Amino acid sequence: MKKLFLIVFCTSLLVTAYGQSNPTKISKFGEFQENWALIEKGGLFGFLDKDGNEVAEPKYEKIYQFGEFQPDWALIEKGKLFGFLDKDGNEIIEPNYEKIYQFGEFQPDWALIEKGKLFGFLDKDGNEVGKPKYEKIYQFGEFQPDWALIEKGNCSDFWTRMGMWL
């Protein structure tokens, strides 16, 4: 009887210890999106719908509120890199950038991106309008209306708001 009690006790202890080392937290539904709940599993975040289906796998260190950058996008962080999820839970921009600035900060429909200390732009559809290969990009209009000075190495050039180089 003592052996049975000891086996049950040890099994219970192991199950309890394992369960506590891998916690899952679920936020209120609607906090991020109407029918979704933010979940945390092993320190990573994702989303569940009201039926308990996983909408976005818990693999992000942080998920920001929808609409902070774009109306239907949420900024995501994975491995200290940033990207975006859409309102369907799809990763529309992989977490590839060390920083993504607000849309409109430099140009109305673009967001400045930074990767490897180099800069470029994303448009509102998630396309790289300019790959991150420039050491510095100045504000549009700082030197000439609708132009931005760009620098790479010892070279400087201008970029128009239409994305064409001069």
Image: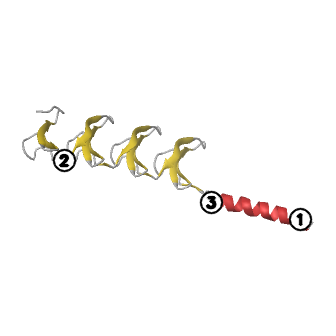
Q: For the point 11% across and 41% down, which residue is it? A: 156
Is there any visible trace of residue 93 in the rendered image? yes
Residue at the spot x=45%, y=49% of the render?
32
Residue highlighted by disc 1: 3
Mark seen at residue 35: none
| Quadrant location, the N terminus | bottom right
**Percent x, y of residue 57:** 53, 44
- Of 65 and 94, nearer the camera is 94
Q: CA distance from mark 1 to mark 3?
A: 27 Å
Q: Give SS at disc 1.
A: helix
The residue sitting at 8% across, 41% down in the picture is 145
Q: Quadrant of the C terminus?
A: top left
Q: Which mark is residue 21?
A: 3
Q: Amino acid at mark 1?
A: Lys
Give percent across and percent down for residue 30.
Answer: 49, 49
Q: Nearer the viewer, mark 1 or mark 3?
A: 1
Task: Identify the mark at residue 136; answer none if there is no mark.
Answer: 2
Give SS at disc 3: helix
Q: Residues within 10 Å of mark 2 (few under 14, many from 20)?
A: some
Mark 3 surroundings: few (<14), some (14-19) or many (≥20) residues within 10 A = few
| Amino acid type at mark 3 | Ser
Total labels: the figure holds 3
> Mark 3 or mark 2: which comes first in sequence?
3
Image-based side of 75 in relation to 38, left or right: left
Residue shown at the point (16%, 44%) measured from the top left: 153
Is residue 72 found left or right of 20 in the rendered image? left
Give SS at disc 2: strand
